[in-house]
Amino acid sequence: MALINRSSGSSTRAMRATAQQREGYTHDITVGNHQITADEPADQGGHDMGPSPQELLSAALASCTAVTMEMYAKRKGWSVEGLEVEARYSPAERGCPTRFELVMRMPPHLSEEQVERLQVIAAKCPVHRTLEGEVAFDERVELS
């Protein structure tokens, strides 16, 4: 069971994700009212029945960045139809930092000023802020 705390403004909402083993490295993940499957690729001993946990991390960053930019654009009355965010994740190797590469593909009709503002807003998405900030873990084992 993983508890994730996210601060949005002045209120704090705890989010919960539960991963339960199905077989091998395949896990059924429950998040709110949603279920997804995570697995390792076949070359890592899994069945490739879903994205790996590290791929889910990239997906979280890409989707959060896109949604954050879209929400901002909507408040400003800007059309960002066709916006696409790609996140590439290179896990840390010994002595090197973890690297994320974000590619934001924006519609060509946006002005330079709008593009610059959206790029600033992208870095304020909650997942981006979590990844670049200090993270603390409270862990415990429960026998069931």
Image (cartoon, rainbow, N blue to C red):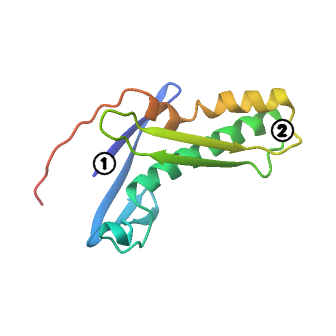
Residue 101 as seen in the image, left or right of residue 137: right
Mark 2 falls on what kind of element?
A: loop
Residue 76 as seen in the image, left or right of residue 33: right
Read off the residue under disc 1: 2
Which circle marks residue 126 in the picture?
none
Given residues 93 and 119, the one toward you in this image is: 93
Given residues 34 and 23, the one toward you in this image is: 23
Identified at 47% across, 62% down, the residue is 34
10 Å neighbourhood of mark 1: few (<14), some, or many (≥20)?
few
Identified at 51% across, 40% down, the residue is 100
Residue 116 as seen in the image, left or right of residue 111: left
Given residues 31 and 102, the one toward you in this image is: 102
Mark 1 falls on what kind of element?
A: strand
10 Å neighbourhood of mark 2: few (<14), some, or many (≥20)?
few
Residue 50 visible at all: yes
Given residues 27 and 40, the one toward you in this image is: 40
Task: Give amino acid for label 2.
Answer: Trp
Which circle marks residue 78 in the picture?
2
Residue 7 visible at all: no
